[in-house]
Image: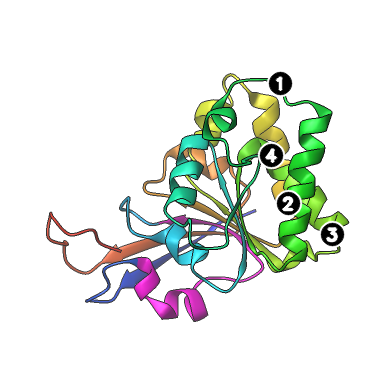
């Protein structure tokens, strides 16, 4: 199966991706799995999704990335899966008991039923998120999954291959999946996706500017 490569030229004056309304409204595919090569870190790609009106699951390979994002949005209605107000406990390396899992899922169920639509989770918990969505009566085709730092899938599979394989299997259940990356290593082509979308500027941005 051939992956289509598309280059989108970023208009002048766009500082962050969230400023480029046409990108989100008309230019990006719907109901597809694709790699979005944003080219530059800190360009506001995850912010654009978290600030949108869409139902979004942001999946990250590392807890600290999720916690930092959650901490930046304390006044917003985001749900950080497995976080129950205790930072130290959230970061503890420990076995998760069935009782813990039940509590996490009940919290998420309450969030969803109250209208919450922004969920932050690690890769290995995405299956739990999907199960809770389905049990809550949600149509998972309405949820966009954003895979942040997705190159980590290839790095981590060397020591937790089963986890990364299961992640890819779960992603197949969702209609729209965006793999975010700031550069595309050759191994990325092993991901099953329909499009590889490059974001380009017509001229270099000033070195001090946080562009895209």
What range is drawn magenta here? 17-37
Using the image, tell me which numbered label, if any, was put on residue 136: 3
Using the image, tell me which numbered label, if any, was put on residue 95: 1
Q: How far apart are marks 2 and 4 (CA)?
A: 12 Å
On the image, numbered disc 2 is attached to which residue? 108
Evaluate if marks 1 and 2 touch, with contact meaning CB atoms under 8 Å apart. Answer: no
Q: Identify the residue shown where x is 63% and y is 41%.
A: 84
Evaluate if marks 2 and 4 touch, with contact meaning CB atoms under 8 Å apart. Answer: no
From the image, state whether disc 2 or disc 4 is nearer to you: 2
Q: In this view, does 81 lie to the left or right of 141?
A: left
Q: Which of 76 and 62 is in front in this view?
A: 76
On the image, numbered disc 4 is attached to which residue? 125
Q: How far apart are marks 4 and 1 (CA)?
A: 13 Å
In the structure shown, which secondary structural element does the residue marked by tag 4 occupy? helix
Q: Is residue 150 visible?
A: no
Determine whether 59 is above or below 2 in the image. Answer: above
The crowd level at tag 4 (other Cα within 10 Å; few <14, some 14-19, many 20+) is some
Q: Distance between the residues labelled 3 and 4?
A: 17 Å
In the structure shown, which secondary structural element does the residue marked by tag 1 occupy? loop
Residue 88 on image: x %, y %: 53, 29
Q: How far apart are marks 3 and 1 (CA)?
A: 26 Å
């Amino acid at each position: 199966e051939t992956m289509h490569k598309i280059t989108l030229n970023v208009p002048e004056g766009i500082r962050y991706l969230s400023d480029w309304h046409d990108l989100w409204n008309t230019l990006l595919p719907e109901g597809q799995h694709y790699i979005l090569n944003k080219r530059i870190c800190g360009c506001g790609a995850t912010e654009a999704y978290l600030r949108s009106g869409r139902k979004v699951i942001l999946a990250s390979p590392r807890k600290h990335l999720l916690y930092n994002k959650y901490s930046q949005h304390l006044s917003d209605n985001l749900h950080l899966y497995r976080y129950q107000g205790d930072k130290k406990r959230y970061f503890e390396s420990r076995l998760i008991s069935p009782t813990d899992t039940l509590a996490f899922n009940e919290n998420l169920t309450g969030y969803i039923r109250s209208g919450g639509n922004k969920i932050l989770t690690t890769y290995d918990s995405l299956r739990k998120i999907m199960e809770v969505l389905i049990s809550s009566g949600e149509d998972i085709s309405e949820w966009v999954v954003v895979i942040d730092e997705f190159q980590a899938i290839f790095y981590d599979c060397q020591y937790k291959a089963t986890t990364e394989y299961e992640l890819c299997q779960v992603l197949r259940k969702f209609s729209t999946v965006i793999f975010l990356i700031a550069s595309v290593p050759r191994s990325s082509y092993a991901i099953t996706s329909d499009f590889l979308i490059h974001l380009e500027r017509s001229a270099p941005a000033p070195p001090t500017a946080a562009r895209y």
